[in-house]
Amino acid sequence: MRIQTDSNGGVANHILPTSATMTGVCVTVISIVRLTAATRHAGTIIDTVFALNGLVFLASCFLSYISMRPHPLSATFEKYADIFFMIGLFMMVIGGFMLSFEVEHF
């Protein structure tokens, strides 16, 4: 699968600022959950999900930045940045559901 790129560098130009912002959102959610933990167990599960989610977005941000640098593997880095970004979005939705339903047990 080939990601279509435009003359400005492609998808990486959009992934970089958005994934950096989403990393900050994950850290903010962790702080809010810590302040308002409705149930102790759910708070730690949700904290863990959003901490891992922040790392996924950080990896996406890093790969996106590397893909914009002149390198023979730039297209590959951009593809992986896109994959990590989509995984991060999926994890954020799951974490949001867990937060809204106060998930206590798996």
Image: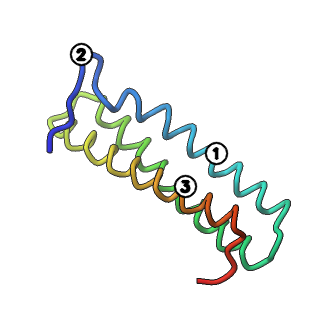
Q: Please state, as top left, top right, bottom left or bottom right, where the C terminus lies in the image.
A: bottom right
Q: Secondary structure at mark 3?
A: helix
Q: Is residue 29 above or below residue 16?
A: below
Question: Left or right: 8 with respect to 22?
Answer: left
Q: Residue furthest front?
A: 101
Q: Quadrant of residue 101?
A: bottom right
Residue at 70% across, 73% down: 44
Q: Earlier in the sequence, mark 1 or mark 2?
A: 2
Toward the viewer: 58 or 91?
Answer: 91
Q: How many marks can you see? A: 3
For the residues bearing labels 1 and 2, Cβ distance under 8 angstroms: no
- Asked whether, in this view, residue 66 is left or right of residue 49, the answer is left
Q: Are marks 3 and 2 in contact (CB under 8 Å)?
A: no
The alpha-carbon separation of the residues under discs 3 and 2 comes to: 30 Å
Task: Report helix, strand or loop for mark 2.
Answer: loop
Q: Position of residue 34 (x, y in %)?
A: 79, 63
> Which of the 4 image quadrants contains residue 77?
top left
- Report x, y in % for residue 13: 38, 27
- At which x and y percent is residue 55? 51, 56
Q: Position of residue 89 (x, y in %)?
A: 47, 50
Q: What is the number of the mark on residue 7?
A: 2
Q: Which mark is residue 70?
A: none
Q: Is residue 10 above or below residue 41?
A: above
Q: Residue at x 41, y 43 (%)?
A: 62
Can you identify the residue that label 3 sits on?
A: 92
Q: Amino acid at mark 3?
A: Met
View extreme (bottom): residue: 105
Neighbours of disc 3 within 10 Å: few (<14), some (14-19), many (20+): many
Q: Are marks 3 and 1 in contact (CB under 8 Å)?
A: yes
Q: Secondary structure at mark 1?
A: helix
Q: Which mark is residue 25?
A: 1
